[in-house]
Image: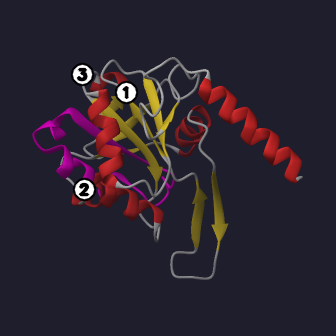
Amino acid sequence: MKTRYFLMALLMLALAACKPAGEHNRFSATDVSGADFAQALSLTDHTGKLRTLADFKGKVVAVFFGYTHCPDVCPTTMADMKQTMKLLGARSDELQVLFVTLDPARDTQAVLAQYVPSFDKRFIGLYGTQDEIAKATADFKIFASKVENSGKSGYTIDHSAGLYLYDKTGKIRLYVAYGEKPAVIAADIEKLL
């Protein structure tokens, strides 16, 4: 087993060395440019308007999948994106944060309208039917699994915790892992701006 990990590490180092000069460490997040997934999104926003990714061309777009009853990952990520906006300063209007619910049964338009803008009034919450959310999670390769519990909420949702960044032309560019510092996220966004 250790040999396999060692060989994988060597392979990754060799592949990194193959990048053209100037390409090393261009982004801190994982570069997914040219990916054949997460190409389209069509859901209703927290004001009742149908939205697609194309609506935000001309801005960098951050797409995060979560739910309002989430005890930790979701509010932390949203707070990190709020801080990222502050770090971007005057350029923060060139970033659109989209929060896609994984819990359409509880995350109604009214709930999202209260929750999502509480982090930043420019953030947009997106919802749809269970089938529409299932299609979006499949298209974006998001893991989500309902976990029944005896608590007040009745269930939680285990889910992927990162977010995707799109450039101003609407092309998927980066996957930002959960827990990345707002300063690092802001630096990657500035490169996309």
Identified by mark 3, the residue type is: Gly
Q: Nearer the viewer, mark 3 or mark 2?
A: 2
Q: Is residue 151 above or below residue 56?
A: below
Measure the alpha-carbon separation of dots 1 and 3.
11 Å
Query: Camera-side residue: 125 or 96?
Result: 96
Which quadrant, please, contains the C terminus?
Answer: top left
Q: Which residues are magenta?
A: 84-110
Residue 173 image position (x, y, % from top left)? 45, 27
Q: Secondary structure at mark 3?
A: loop
Residue 149 image position (x, y, % from top left)? 64, 77
Question: In this figure, which residue is indicated by the disc labeled 2?
Answer: 83
Identified by mark 2, the residue type is: Gln
Q: Is residue 67 above or below residue 128?
A: below
Question: In this figure, which residue is indicated by the disc labeled 1?
Answer: 53
Which residue lies at the image location 59% right of the left edge and 43% below the top edge? Answer: 142
Residue 186 image position (x, y, % from top left)? 29, 44
| Marked residue nearer the N-terminal end (3 or 2) | 3
Question: In this figure, which residue is indicated by the disc labeled 3?
Answer: 58
10 Å neighbourhood of mark 2: few (<14), some, or many (≥20)?
A: some
Which residue lies at the image location 32% right of the left edge and 53% below the top edge? Answer: 182
Cβ atoms at labels 1 and 2 below 8 Å apart: no
Quadrant of res 117: bottom left
Query: Camera-side residue: 92 or 181?
Result: 181
Inspect the magenta stretch and tell me whether residue 87 lies in it.
Answer: yes
Q: Residue furthest left?
A: 90
10 Å neighbourhood of mark 3: few (<14), some, or many (≥20)?
A: some
Which residue lies at the image location 34% right of the left edge and 31% below the top edge? Answer: 51
Which residue lies at the image location 58% right of the left edge and 55% below the top edge? Answer: 159
